[in-house]
Amino acid sequence: MKQQQLVTLLVLIALPALAAGAAAAGVVALLTHADAGRVLAKPELYLLRVSVGTPPRAVALTLDTGSDLVWTQCAPCHDCFDQGVLPVLDPSASNTYAPLPCDAPLCRALPFTSCDAAGGDRSCVYAYHYGDKSLTVGHLADDEFTFAGETRRVTFGCGHFNKGIFQANETGIAGFGRGRWSLPSQLNVTTFSYCFTSMFDSASSVVTLGGGGGELYRDAHAGDVRTTRLIRNPSQPSLYFVSLLAITVGNTRIAVPETRVRRSPAAATAIIDSGASITTLPEEVYEAVKAAFVAQVRLPAGCVDGSALDICFALPAAAFGWRRRAAAAVAVPALTFHLDGGADWELPRENYVFEDHAARVMCVVLDAAAGGEQIAVIGNYQQQNTHVVYDLESDTLSFAPARCDKLAASP
């Protein structure tokens, strides 16, 4: 999870003031996997495909519900990561680009900023870093964002210094959290939805912000819609918490204890995070889940070189017979996340099992949370081919199995 922390690093440059534009709702954008076909890379990400500026220039932003800021790399790029074939955005080439002044509300909302004290029409320079030590520093600005033909004015970070863990074909991050800087907040929408296609193919899908995102179930759903409540957590107000009550592995049900984190609601036991690759569980829960898989799979332990996955099994030679696939030959216990309100998230095999046929190893794609973390994180691997709808007005999360590549490209 690229869980955000804001740090104080603001440079004040004299620039004219900018009037804030009005937000709007009801847009759709293309969604692709960051590295389709790769063997379980870390991190595994999904990219929001939009264009910025006038004339519009393409960018590819990681969809991250675990952070708020929207940003992309910008020229001049003093210290940046390789973003592949897409050119670095040049703000001087856009005739609608406008740096955000220090007295703008979104700049003033940044905590511990010297802009709050100095004010004025000088340019707001931001620094924003994430829990994985990634960092972006640059100017906050306004420009036109084009979403599948619809244009909205968005405040975003134009990053000139960007370091950390990034894919070669992403240009930045689109924060979808609850904070004021996130894309849903800026567009003033009450719902948004996404549907992640398989990590191992090149199919695309869509993201909806506002409009009738839930109606997409009608044409592409492949199972019942389940709904659970979203829990607000004052200690981490930007994140989307749910109550994960238990996990069932085959015939074993494992309770998830209430959180004991200070200032956090006891029921807020998990975070839904599209920017996290793999679901992580509190260590005691993870060990119980691991024991249940080991007891029920009954295969020798295996390992995948270069992977942190720990619940791995050596596949038998019979799994690789003529015209036979390991997926059909080796049975694994079913995996279900039990959420509050009777919302059982029954994961299909491909959403929690990874097979390395070259190494003849099968792994369960779960991990223990680092540093004694007591809150689970439900990552994007477990959300493949699932249509997920966030209702920010009613504070609910709905999900259903779906053929994500079949979603219509309009709300």
Image (cartoon, grey):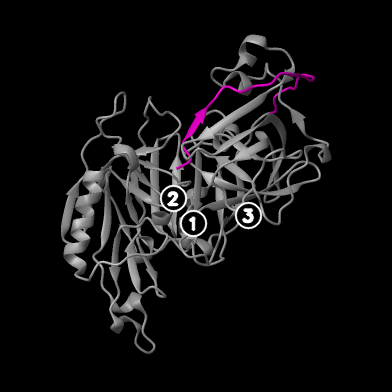
Q: Amino acid at mark 1?
A: Phe
- Can you name the residue that lies furthest to the top here? 117
Q: Which residues are magenta?
A: 1-21
Does 36 sit left or right of 153 as displayed? left
Does 185 sit left or right of 304 as displayed? right
- Quarter of the figure that contains the N terminus: top left
- Can you name the residue that lies furthest to the front here? 305
Q: Which residue is mark 3?
A: 169
Decide which of tag 2 and tag 3 comes sooner along the chain: 3
Q: Which residue is mark 2?
A: 388
Q: Quadrant of residue 8?
A: top right
Q: Which residue is mark 1?
A: 196
Provide residue 299's location: percent of width, then percent of height. 22, 71
Q: Quadrant of residue 297?
A: bottom left
Is residue 237 covered in magenta? no
Judged by depth in the image, the label closer to the viewer, 2 or 1, is 1
Q: Residue at x 39, y 47 (%)?
A: 398
Task: Specify few, some or many for label 1: CA neighbours under 10 Å numbering under 14, 14-19, or 20 or more.
Answer: many
Judged by depth in the image, the label closer to the viewer, 2 or 3, is 3
Helix, strand or loop at mark 1 = loop
Provide residue 317's location: percent of width, then percent of height. 30, 82
Q: Quadrant of residue 358?
A: bottom left
Residue 408 circle label: none
Whether residue 215 is situated above or below residue 265 in the rendered picture: below
Helix, strand or loop at mark 2 = strand
Which is more toward the observer, 94 or 367? 367
| C-alpha separation, residue under disc 2 versus residue under disc 1 | 9 Å
Decide which of tag 2 and tag 1 comes sooner along the chain: 1
Which is more toward the observer, 372 or 353? 372
